Image (spheres, coloured by chain):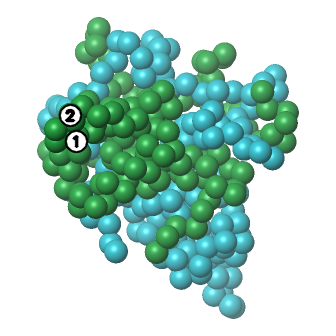
Chain colours: A green, B cyan
Amino acid sequence: MRHKSFDTMQCPIARGLEHVGEWWSILILRDAFRGMRRFDEFRDSLGIAPTMLTKRLNGLVETGLLERRRYSEHPPRDEYVLTAIGKDFRPVLLAMMAFGNRHFPPDRQTVQIVNQQTGARVEPVLVDPTTGQPVDGPGYIVVTTPAESVA
Amino acid sequence: MRHKSFDTMQCPIARGLEHVGEWWSILILRDAFRGMRRFDEFRDSLGIAPTMLTKRLNGLVETGLLERRRYSEHPPRDEYVLTAIGKDFRPVLLAMMAFGNRHFPPDRQTVQIVNQQTGARVEPVLVDPTTGQPVDGPGYIVVTTPAESVA
């Protein structure tokens, strides 16, 4: 079953989901941030069916989050590299990581953000860079505005 | 087709996705943050098939992100309220909103975070609360550690 297209919705969350696709795409992006570029690397990491992986990689290239680069002519082989847009998805993944760590803790090992200088584990917070205050707190609201008023 | 369960994976992103489910669940959570609680409200907002909506609401209750509350006995009617865990998913949604606004701008109207005091539009940044520095920048790495060393 094809998902209903959310692209007609004006909500940026819906638009983000539309362009990033679904779970597999998000996990492919995660692996791309871990340095993976090649089809076999993604396949081995995710245990995903090759046809599904091809489809998701093509989708991520089409929407501009990954760029396809040929690294071998004989045989023809491509690798997939994060674009600037793709790289900008990282905070979404890191926010998801913090949520997963906080509420669904693992039994064996975990992945976390660490301050390289101090070695401290970081619980990241989404803030307004102007004030340093969390946007998920008092003083901040989510409003709907006409697109033309948006810079 | 049932998604492969990512729950066996130790990655918190995969675990987060496992528990939140997929697009519909994320959009249901979005609407819950907008104040919706009732089946009909979610259905009208999302244009989702009732069977699918029931399934997703049940899933979100099972994983503890929504709580089911009976608001009428005759006829029996439930509403769905965000739990503490559900509320904590909001930064993920806000990060996704910022990503959608930045890269897939809408044509008509958009939804954005606004500083209530100044009226300024906010481009939120995910930071280390200890230093105020963006975690998606130099000085921060993502590491895999044994769970027993995690507080």
Quadrant location of the C terminus of chain B in the rendered image? top left
Q: Which residue is mark 1?
A: A76
Q: Secondary structure at mark 2?
A: strand
Q: For this view, does A26 lie left or right of residue A50?
A: right
* Residue A6 pos. (x, y %): 62, 59
Pick the front one: A85 or A11: A85
Q: Is residue A123 left or right of residue B9?
A: right
Q: Crowdedness of circle 1 by 10 Å Cα count: few (<14), some, many (20+)?
A: few
Mark 1 touches mark 2? (CB < 8 Å): yes
Q: Is residue B146 above or below residue A27?
A: above
The residue under the point 23% across, 45% down is A39
Q: Residue furthest front?
A: A74
Q: Which residue is mark 2?
A: A72
Residue at horizontal 18 percent and vertical 45 percent from the top: A40
Q: Where, by quadrant of the figure, is residue A80 drawn?
A: top left
The label shown at residue A108 is none
> Residue at left 22%, top 41%?
A76
**Is residue B61 visible to us here?**
no
Q: From this view, report whether residue A139 is shown above or below residue B50.
A: above
Examine the image and state in which quarter residue A86 appears. Answer: top left
Number of marks in the rendered image: 2
Indicate the chain on which mark 2 is placed. Answer: A
What chain does mark 1 sit on? A
The residues bearing labels 1 and 2 have C-alpha atoms spaced at a distance of 5 Å
Q: Is residue A96 above or below residue B125?
A: below
Residue lying at 37% horizontally and 57% vertically, measured from the top left: A55
Image coords of residue A15 (percent x, y): 61, 49
The image shows residue B115 at horizontal and vertical percentages of 75, 28
Q: What amino acid is at disc 1?
A: Pro
Q: Name the element at disc 1.
A: loop
Q: Please name the amino acid that badge 2 sits on.
A: Ser
